[in-house]
Image (spheres, rainbow, N blue to C red):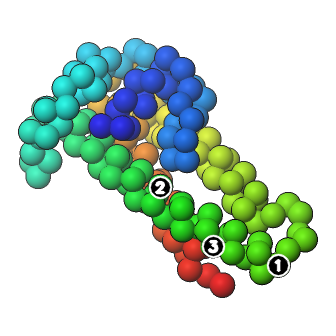
Amino acid sequence: MHAVRQIFIAAVGPSPGCGSLSGNPIHHIRSMGYTALFLLCANPVFAQDLDCTDPVTQVEMTGCASLAADAADQELNDVWKLAVKAAQDRDTLDPGYEPSGESILRRAQRSWISFRDQACSAEATLARGGTIASQLFLICLERLTRHRTNDLRLFAMTN
């Protein structure tokens, strides 16, 4: 339930990390579904009971979107480690270049996180004030995170 917690935290304050939300880009969430988000955050048993093959209620759909975003975030973090290692290996083979490949990669990732958060906030405005806005944000988060994971995987594999 990492993503739901982060959305809740993002409305209150920033949350650092490789694939986590940075800054406070989703102000519109303040007016949406806090009750649903709080219930999802506060009840880990609920997350285990979700049947995401056929979610029916908005809370279930948002919960399933959160689980999918969490899975995408975990995969991103795993692949991120490979990408950083690849950058470090390249830096070792080609010393003396400034900025280092690792430094460039880290700056790019921070920029991507900011882009992702803003892009998903924009997509969620399609349902601004509605209960589906959180779900739209999470679906976008999953989609963009999976795309970035593929980019990082390619970076890690390329010599």
**Real-space Cα separation, disc 1 to disc 3, in angstroms:** 12 Å
- Measuring 47% from the left and 55% from the top, which residue is drawn there? 77
Rendering coords of residue 117 (x, y %): 54, 39
| Quadrant into which the N terminus falls | top left
| Mark sitting on residue 77 | 2
Q: Splitting the image into 4 quarters, where does residue 152 fall?
A: bottom right
The disc label shown at residue 149, or none: none
The residue sitting at 78% across, 81% down in the picture is: 93
User: Which amino acid type is marked by label 3?
Assistant: Ala
- Quadrant for the C terminus in the image: bottom right
Judging by the rendered image, the residue that carries numbered circle 3 is 86
At numbered mark 3, what does the secondary structure look like: helix, strand or loop? helix
Q: CA distance from mark 2 to mark 1?
A: 26 Å
Q: Could you classify mark 1 by the number of other residues whose Cα lies within 10 Å: few (under 14), some (14-19), or many (20 or more)?
A: few
Question: Which of the two discs, 2 and 1, labels the residue nearer the N terminus?
Answer: 2
Residue 7 image offset from top left, x and y in percent: 42, 29
Q: Amino acid at mark 1?
A: Asp
Per the model, the C-alpha gap separating discs 2 and 3 is 14 Å
Q: Secondary structure at mark 2?
A: helix
Q: How many C-alpha atoms fall within 10 Å of the one at disc 3: few (<14), some, or many (≥20)? A: some
